[in-house]
Image (cartoon, rainbow, N blue to C red):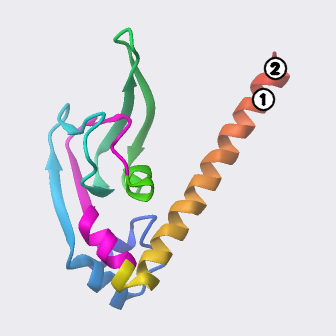
Amino acid sequence: MNKLLKQQVLLEDLSNQELTRISKVIQKLKFKKGEFIFGEKEDTKGLYLIHSGRVEIAKVTPDGWKQTLAVFTKGHFFGELSILEKRRHEAVATAAENTEIFLIGKEDFERMEKEDSAIAFKIIKSIALVMCKNLRRMNDKFLNALISY
């Protein structure tokens, strides 16, 4: 299990001992293509790590149009904003193909923050680094669009 967990962006900096501790709380979930993982306004169940497959994150506009925000594949994660901000989901997550997910449950993550803060810190730091990279990429796209205009 540790080898599989080490392939996850959020867990790649954890030691084998830390991975073993995390593996005790991780749930393995399977979703068929088209199946909802969570819906908008639902309470968060935890932090989702994609083991295989693809997940689409989308938002439905007030007039009923579905707008895809992101598509994630193996090794990526989602649900982090709801965990960090302790709020409900603001988008819909759907399996874009048959997908397997590792879930670190909300209660387990919150317990980890209190009882095993070194592991929680490493995970939160990885989330922050990925979010910074995504923000830089979005800024570059925005600037390129302005320059091209």
| Nearer-the-camera pick, 65 or 7 | 65
Query: Do labels 2 and 1 touch, CB within 8 Å?
Result: yes
Q: Which residues are magenta?
A: 87-113
Q: Specify few, some or many for label 2: CA neighbours under 10 Å numbering under 14, 14-19, or 20 or more.
A: few
Q: Residues within 10 Å of mark 1 (few under 14, many from 20)?
A: few
Q: Is residue 27 left or right of residue 138?
A: left
Q: Quadrant of residue 50?
A: bottom left
Q: In this picture, is 10 found above or below 143?
A: below
Amino acid at dot 2: Ser
Q: Residue at x 36, y 34 (%)?
A: 91
Which residue is found at the position 51% from the left and 61% from the top?
127
Residue 14 found in image quarter:
bottom left
- Residue 125 locus on image (x, y percent): 55, 69
Which image quadrant for residue 21? bottom left
On-image quarter of the C terminus = top right
Secondary-structure class at tag 1: helix
Residue 29: x and y in percent read 16, 55
Residue at mark 1: 144
The residue at which mark 2 appears reads as 148
Whether residue 10 is situated above or below residue 70 in the rendered picture: below
User: Can residue 11 be seen in this snapshot?
Assistant: yes
